[in-house]
Each structure stands twice: as C-alpha cells, then as structure tokens.
Image (cartoon, rainbow, N blue to C red):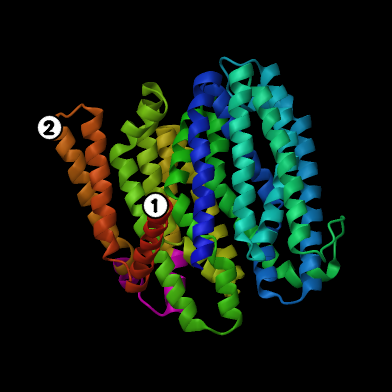
Amino acid sequence: MKRAIISNVTGSIIGFIFSLIAIPIQIRLLGSEAYGLIGFIASLQIILVVFDFGLSSSVVREIAASADDDVSKGIVQTGATIYWIVASIVGCLVFVGADWIAQDWLHVKTLTPEYIASAVRVIAIYMILNWPVGHYANVLFALKRLDLVNGLRVAVTVVSQLGGIVVILLTYDLIAFLMWLTFSSFVSVVLHLLFIKRVFPAVTLTPRISLAVIRRIWRTSFDMNIVSTASIIYTQLDKLLISNLLPLSVLGYYSIAYRLMVGATLIPVSIASITLPLFAEKFSRGQHTELVHTYNRISQLILYIITGFTFAFVFWGYDLLKIWTTAETAANTYQTLGILTVGALLNTVTVVGYYLVLATGRSRLLSFIYSAGVIPYVICLYFLIIYLQIIGVAIALILYSLYLIGTLLFYIQWKITNESVIRWLNRNFTAFVIIGFIIFGTGRFLIESSHASSVVIVWGIGVLSGIAYFGLGLFLLEATSRKEIFAFFNTTLRTILKRGN
C-alpha cells in the first residue's frame, strides 16, 4: 500500500506543479475571459458524466474483485465501447451547438461570439478524445498498476502543459492552445491503449458490448450512475451556472480559486483514491477488522494533511495569489479560495468512507444519499450565486459537505465501524482543526499586529507556521502511521546522503 500511495501522490503532485506553472501564463497572455473559457471545459463534463452509467466505479470494483480474466476482458471492452459512443454523441452535440453556446449562454465582453464558437468546436473534439482516457486509466488502476497510471498522467501533463505554454508564447491564441490540448488527448488515448494491451495481453480492444457483463454490473452501475450524476452536479454545476449568470471573467477568477483548492486536496485525494481496490479485496476475503482499521488510519492521515493546507490557504491565500498571478486576480479570488478550502476540508471527512461503502457493496445507499441532496443543493446554489456571486458558490460547497457528514459518515459509523460519530471526529478531525487554526491564526496575527510588509517576513512566518502544524500534528497520528512516516523520511534521507557521497 505504501508504494501505491507514494506513486499516486507523486504523480498528482508533478501534474499539479505543471498546472501551477501554466496557469499564470495563460491568464497573463490570454486574458481572464479566455481562461474562463478553459474553465468552461469542466462545466461541459456534466453532460458526459450523466451518461457515464456508473461504469467508472463499477469497472474498478469488479475487475479488482474478480479472478476471471474472461470477465475482466468483457468489462474492459464493453466499458470502452460505451465510453466512445457517449463521448462521440455528446461531442457532436456540443460541436453543432457552438454558435448557441457562444451567443446565448456565455457572457463575453472582449472576445467575439464567432471566435468563441470556433473555440467551443475545438473543445468538442477534445471532449471526444479525452473522455475515454478515464476508462482506460481505471482499468490500469483496477489491475493495481498505479505506476503506469501515474507515469502516463505525468507524461501527458508535461507534454500538454509545456507544449501549451510554447504554443501560447508563439501564437497568443486560445484556439491554437485548445488544438494542442486536443492533440495531447489523442496521444494519451493511444498510450493508454498500448499499455493496457501490454499489461493485459488477453484483452481485445475492438468495439463490442457484452450482455453478460451488463447483467453482471447493471445494478451497481445503475446506483453509481445516480451517484456520479449527483456528484457532478455538486462539483461542476457551480461553473455552469457562473458561466451563464455572471461574466466569463468571473468564471476565470473562480476557476483559479478552484484549481488551488484542488491543490489543497491533492495529496489526501490521491491517497484516498487507492483505497477502493484495497477495500474491495479485504471485504471479499471477510477481513472486517483489518478493513475498518485501514479505513480509520487512512482517514486520519488525509485529514491531518489537508487541514494544514486549508489553514495555509485561509490565512495566506492572498499572498500566494498575488505572487502567483496578479494583484487584481488576488483581490478578486482570495476570499473565495479561503471558503472553498474550508469546504474541501469538510468534504474530505467522508471521502475515504465513500470508497468503503462502495467496496462493501452498498451502492444503493450511496445513490440515495447523493440524489436526496441534489434539489436542495441546486436551489441554494442558484440563490447564493445571485446574491453573493462566487463567494456564494464556496458557501454552497460547505453546505454540501456538512450534508455528507450528517448522512454518509453517520451511516458508516453506525453500520460498518460501530463507533460513534463524535468519537471518530474527535480522534481524526477536530484535534487537527484546533491546532491548525491556532498555529496559522497566530502566525497571521503576528504579521498584522506588527504591520510587517516584507515578503521575507510574511512567508517566513508562514513557513514556520506550516512546520509547527505538521510537526505537532504528527504526534496526534496513530502510532503505525507515525512510524511509517518516520521510516519513509529516514529512508529518503539516507538515499539522498548516499547519492551525495
């Protein structure tokens, strides 16, 4: 498990670093409206996820738990065929509706509707090529080849982001950049196909839909399609509504805050995402005690990590944005960033539990919980955008996360772990929040009370606050986790010293 965590975290961090490098260049050279259109790509994923049919989660669970290569072959082939069909249909609809999107949906001031329509057509082709990559990555993930999953992700990210920077510097043109992203997606598809064939030689990649596979997974897929659709509403409807209700430049600002929020969750989510095949395997073997212990340990570890990043962004968000982008962007974004990261922290409380419930075959429960909150969330989100604009969107994320804590976490503790919610939160969450708020809040108070303006002082105190939090929080972790962390750093340090000699 340690190797899987390290592989997943490393791949995510490398990819995120290249995104951090690319974003300020995109904003400065293309403008906030153009960057808003890049963010609009994520909004269009809503359409695709609605027609995911729950395959993404079902593929991982079924392949990870199955020892029958024939069954796994059918799942890979059937899933790929459905993904390509859906992506092609949705992509063609977006392509045909490009003029309507440019003229009637988006609110643009500096870019012409004709230019926007051309960009949307390129985005449609990008969607067709990019969507099936997720299925192929899930197959490699289910086969426990995280080294390949993350290696491919890093390679594609480096090519797309660095190549995109070169294209922007040479052309200063959004459409040229989008065409490069489309080409990168094509390369990604080809590479994933080649590696799946290498890892799983028996698989056939020609289009085919197996009725036996559909009968095997349809119940779980149906439930997970509801969950996936609800999840995409919770995570992507905000951008879609912003793109229609507010200027496109505001979507650009929100996309920046959202990207940094994703950065705060990067390591925790990377760790949590490896748990589904692990939990599915332990559950299929009847290892309940070990299953619950692993769930608790991983939950505590990721909450320890994300709490530090959350309070760093809450108290140092403006300083970070000002250095990373521009003073104007920082002023329009930092408050939203702070609230978003708090929402992300609350959301992380249930992220490992989600995979635990899915691995134990309770997909119907997930579909009920996620679907029940959709209508209240959409109503709240709409009015929060109207009255509070992008800050309202961030508040909506907090409300959604609290809803999951009150429903999903309560069920997990009641039916699976047999431990009270309050006790679980006190051990895995509350203590980290208290010390995080005190340490980072004290650091900020020292800066404000002394009227320090030096960048060195501001960031020096910030770094010291981070060291203090992660150092103190380390001793609140379970002994096993603490020993593994010390062992990891000790091994890494010895390796560096040997290379130095």
Residue at (44% x, 47% y) in the render: 397
The disc at residue 446 is none
Q: Are marks 2 and 1 in contact (CB under 8 Å)?
A: no
Q: What amino acid is labelled 2 in the image?
A: Ser
Residue position for label 2: 450
Please state the extent of the stretch shown in magenta in the rendering: 407-426
Magenta span: predominant SS is helix
Residue at (60% x, 76% y) in the render: 281
Mark 1, residues whose alpha carbon is within 10 Å: few (<14), some, or many (≥20)?
A: few
Report whether 24 appears left or right of 76: left
Residue position for label 1: 501
Mark 2, residues whose alpha carbon is within 10 Å: few (<14), some, or many (≥20)?
A: few
In the rendered image, the residue lying farthest to the left is: 450
Task: Look at the image and tell me whether residue 249 can be seen.
Answer: no
Of badges 2 and 1, nearer the viewer stands 1
Residue 162 locus on image (x, y percent): 59, 32
Q: Secondary structure at mark 1?
A: loop
Q: Quadrant of residue 405?
A: bottom left
Residue 275 locus on image (x, y percent): 53, 66
In the rendered image, the residue lying farthest to the front is: 501
| 411 part of magenta stretch | yes
| 391 part of magenta stretch | no
Q: CA distance from mark 2 to mark 1?
A: 45 Å
Q: What amino acid is labelled 1 in the image?
A: Asn
Report whether 30 appears left or right of 500: right
Q: Secondary structure at mark 2?
A: helix
